[in-house]
Image: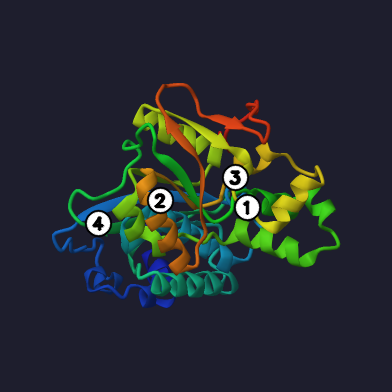
Amino acid sequence: MSDSQNPSAEDSLIARYFKPLATDPGAFGLVDDAAVLSSSGDDIVVTTDAIVEGVHYLATDPPDTIARKALRVNLSDLAAKGAAPAGFVLTLALRSTEDSWLGLFADALGADAKSFGCPLLGGDTVSTPGPQMISITAFGRVPKGRMVGRTGARPGDLILVTGTIGDAALGLDVLTGGAAAAALASEPAARDVLVSRYRVPQPRNVLAQAVRDHATAAMDVSDGLAGDLTKLCAASGVSAIVDVARVPLSAAAADLIARNIVSVETLIAGGDDYEVLCTLPPAQSGALIAAGQAAGVAITAIGTIVAGHDQPRFLDRQGQELALKRLSYSHF
């Protein structure tokens, strides 16, 4: 992690906040400008995601939740590939280096790195006059040739998703004073649950091996269930039919739907769920669902892969197709 413009200031920052996180021997205590990641005969899976202030998190979000989100969105990608975390590199673009912010950020990042077995290997720090940005590239390991991609879905496969869908979109709505905020004004517990889902994703790394063992295709739901399923189907050269009534919802989300506060589209096209979306033959579904139960993660079948190249169809309780104005969150 280096910045030639002010090496002494950056060296001090790194030594104080991030050297304690670099527990892997290949990180060399962050004294080098490169690291070594041993493959141990496995394939190395590489994924990268950046989160930007005002786009992926709010300027008022606590620094500990920002740190956790930055790492966890990458861990979510590894989980959907069936990969075990191996380490990560970090790039920080900061407006300031206040102890009050960096201390909380580094403590939370270190706690998650330890909890998920994904140590810091290196990175870079720079100053910026604009919005803050945190970019992480994470590395994972899978047995050779076993990474689960997006291209393996086949007609007849079931479509399964972990957890619940739409909570993060509602959490953002609460934080920005939208319809959900007004509707839940007297329900602080529900508000807190939704806000937590937006600020601190729950990557499903505990299911990585089960996904690897059973899924034909998988990806994490980052931009919205409808849009991400469309991407998976396009990559596999197939289409899909989804029973929207079977899409798993939290109690708070279901209540807001029942009260007509938000639409189904808000939930299935909202971003930041970070659940695993996967396809697999019906005969394999029981094993994956059982693995989820053992890990305390609900897994729900929501539809079927079908032949064709049309966009997936989302059907309501009456079997009528929903006309979605948008499929996912757009960054541009």
SS for tag 2? helix
Query: What's the coloring here?
Result: rainbow
Write down the residue under mark 4.
Answer: 142
Q: Which residue corresponds to the image point at 39% horizontal and 44% vertical from the top-left?
A: 282
**In front: mark 2 or mark 4?**
2
Q: Are marks 2 and 4 in contact (CB under 8 Å)?
A: no
Vertical order, 158 against 187 (above or below)? above
- Which is more N-terminal, label 4 or label 2? 4
Q: Tag 2 or tag 1, which sits nearer the N-term?
A: 1
How many angstroms separate mark 2 from mark 4 (CA)? 21 Å
Q: Amino acid at mark 1?
A: Ala
* Residue with the mark numbered 1: 168
How far is mark 4 from mark 3, CA to CA? 31 Å
Q: CA distance from mark 1 to mark 2?
A: 26 Å
- Residue at 83 percent across and 52 percent down: it is 183
Of the two numbered discs 4 and 3 in the rendering, the one whose residue sits closer to the viewer:
3
Label 4 neighbour load within 10 Å: few <14, some 14-19, many 20+:
many
The numbered mark at residue 285 is 2
N-terminal of the two: label 3 or label 2?
A: 3
- Report x, y in % for residue 326: 62, 30
In this rendering, the label closer to the viewer, 1 or 2: 2
- Tell me the kind of residue under disc 4: Val
In this rendering, the answer to whether 204 lies above or below 326 is below
Q: Which mark is residue 246?
A: 3
